[in-house]
Amino acid sequence: PLCCPSRSGLLSGFNAYNTGVMNNFPPKGGATAFDDANTIAVLLKQQGYQTALLGKYLNNYTEALAPYIPPGWDLFLDVEKGSWFNYDYVRGRSQASTAGTGQILHNTLYNTYFIRDEALKFIDQNADQPFFLYWAPKAPHGPATAAPEDLNKFLDFKYNAPSLHEADVSDKPEYVRNKEYEDEDGEADDDHADFPVKQLQSIQAVDRSIKALIDKLAAKGILEKTVIIFAGDNGYMWGEHGLWKKGQPYEESIHEPL
């Protein structure tokens, strides 16, 4: 359960063993490992759809490929790096079967709201024809910075799963017993204590944005003939069995909303 293998699967329809994207970064993963010649955007573009990708594309895209624009996108807007209020992004377009070259631009609008507004404009411009919108907000990805109006929400939230900070892990694999996972980012459990609250706060702007997109579809009279697929790219652990983040073979990490 990692970002890039999962997102490669969403775009291509194949699992990691078929895409070759086994990790988030080279040599066995990242955007450079992904074959972008036969994605859902390419196929739909060939059938006359207007296509847009707004938000996060694939890990290592910014470092290795930008401002390259993969084939199949009428609007490609990658917002991945930088702070939530001060960031560069790539904007451009490509043809159905050939790549394009975009521009690297700068913005200071809270990034969830930025791609929300771009999505609303895309629907406005294409409501009278078939379109495919791939809307991929960064939230609640770390560091999970909330919109200003959400900073005081969920401050009393306490996560209390039965497996949280499990004292007896004698029945668990060696890496769990030895707590090797704590060394990945040099963080102990206490460093994560407020992260669930930050994730809950940052997802509020996503929820409001989804409502805005649905309201726009309704206002354009096309909600009932629009297919909406809601999915995550991986699960996340909040301290179950002493584990944090993702990439672990446990239910909380491998389950995705769909």
Image (spheres, rainbow, N blue to C red):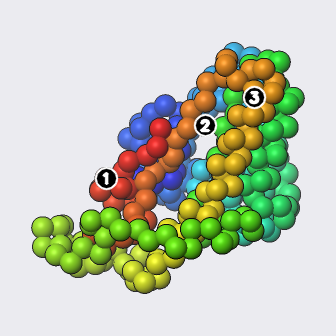
Task: Say which of marks 3 and 2 sits in front.
Answer: 3
Marks 1 and 2, how far apart at CA: 30 Å
Q: Which residue is mark 2?
A: 36
Of mark 3 and mark 2, the one earlier in the sequence is 2
Q: Which mark is residue 184?
A: none
Q: Which residue is mark 3?
A: 217
Please state if 84 lies on the left or on the right of 2 as rendered. Answer: right
The image shows residue 86, relative to residue 42, as above or below, that is below
Residue located at (47% from left, 82% from top) = 191
Q: Which residue is mark 1?
A: 251
Marks 3 and 1, how far apart at CA: 34 Å
Marks 3 and 2, how far apart at CA: 29 Å
Amino acid carrying mark 3 in the image:
Leu
Q: Secondary structure at mark 3?
A: helix
Mark 3 Cα within 10 Å, few/some/many (few <14, many 20+)? some
Whether tag 3 and tag 1 are in contact, CB under 8 A, the answer is: no
Whether tag 1 and tag 2 are in contact, CB under 8 A, the answer is: no
Q: Secondary structure at mark 1?
A: helix
Amino acid carrying mark 1 in the image:
Glu
Q: Secondary structure at mark 2?
A: helix
**Residue 3 percent location from the top left of the image:** 51, 53
